[in-house]
Amino acid sequence: MLIGQGGQTGKVELTESIQTAMRGCTLLRSLDDETFSKVVQFSHARELPENTLIFEHGSELTDLYLLISGGVKLLRLVPSGDEKVLEIINPGETFAEAVIFMGMSKYPVTAVTLSSSTLVGIQAKPYLNLLKSSNALCLEMLGNLSMRLHGMVNEVDRLTLHNATFRLVDYLLNQIPDERDNTLEEQTNLQLTAPKRVIASRLSVKPETLSRTLKELSQRGLIRFHGSHIEFLDIKKLRELISLES
């Protein structure tokens, strides 16, 4: 059963910590206390094991989602039967919210957990009713979708104009929470939230190309890696590397 279709799989309480995370997400942070309490009433939380189907391409749209912990991949199947990973969702990020603005009644992608994950499902229809009654919430949503669109445009640029090294370095740097501040220069550790084969699909490179690129970066003294653990040895040079190819 798809969890977005009313399944009770892994149901957990909307604890104070989960509600705090909900409060901080783009979809809900502009709500007053009374309206937020209403949202809580039509939301549900789930704890799901790795490789659990959240919703399937073409299934009925029921919920928008906020990832609390773990990881989720959004994908489509290509004619060969292989997966094409379109996006990797990290904790604190939402997904499936754009669908309600597209006049669609079905999910356009498939969502599957990458690891043991906790996520909140927010019923789509009641949330859409809130949007219709709140200008502030609509503006928040439009801002969120605009950022997503901008990111997709940049993604097309990365996948069409740059090589595998650029794509991988750019992806790794963007996994560092403080990287956007451009102030982190010291050695930094990163635990990848997705298997390397999934990251390779996300970056539109072959798994063997990803492995080879990691080894090349390691041989150059820029990173050290073991399994899913990445140790950044020279973030400044990594930034320069993708800057030179921009």
Image: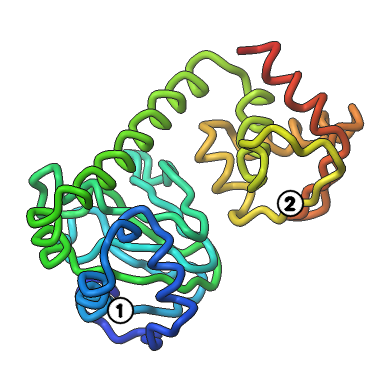
Three-letter code, disc 2 = Leu
Residue 124 percent across, percent down from the top left: 17, 63
Res 7 quadrant in image: bottom left
- Do the residues under discs 2 and 1 have CB atoms within 8 angstroms? no
User: Is 115 on the left-hand or right-hand side of 213?
Assistant: left
Three-letter code, disc 1 = His
Q: Between residue 31 and residue 234, name the one nearer to us.
A: 31
Q: Which residue lies at the image location 15% right of the left edge and 48% below the top edge?
A: 135
Crowdedness of circle 2 by 10 Å Cα count: few (<14), some, many (20+)? Answer: some
Q: Is residue 1 above or below residue 58?
A: below
Q: Between residue 206 and residue 97, name the one nearer to us.
A: 97
Q: Which residue lies at the image location 81% right of the left edge and 47% below the top edge?
A: 188
Residue 92 percent across, percent down from the top left: 48, 59
Q: Which residue lies at the image location 66% right of the left edge and 44% below the top edge?
A: 178
Scheme of colours in the image: rainbow
Q: CA distance from mark 2 to mark 1?
A: 30 Å
User: Is 55 on the left-hand or right-hand side of 169?
Assistant: left
Q: Which residue lies at the image location 82% right of the left edge and 36% below the top edge?
A: 185
User: Is 244 on the left-hand or right-hand side of 65?
Assistant: right
Q: Residue 44: which disc? A: 1
Residue 21 percent across, percent down from the top left: 45, 68
Q: Is residue 2 above or below residue 94?
A: below
Q: Is residue 209 visible?
A: no
Q: Which residue is mark 2?
A: 190
Name the secondary structure under disc 2.
strand
Name the secondary structure under disc 1.
strand
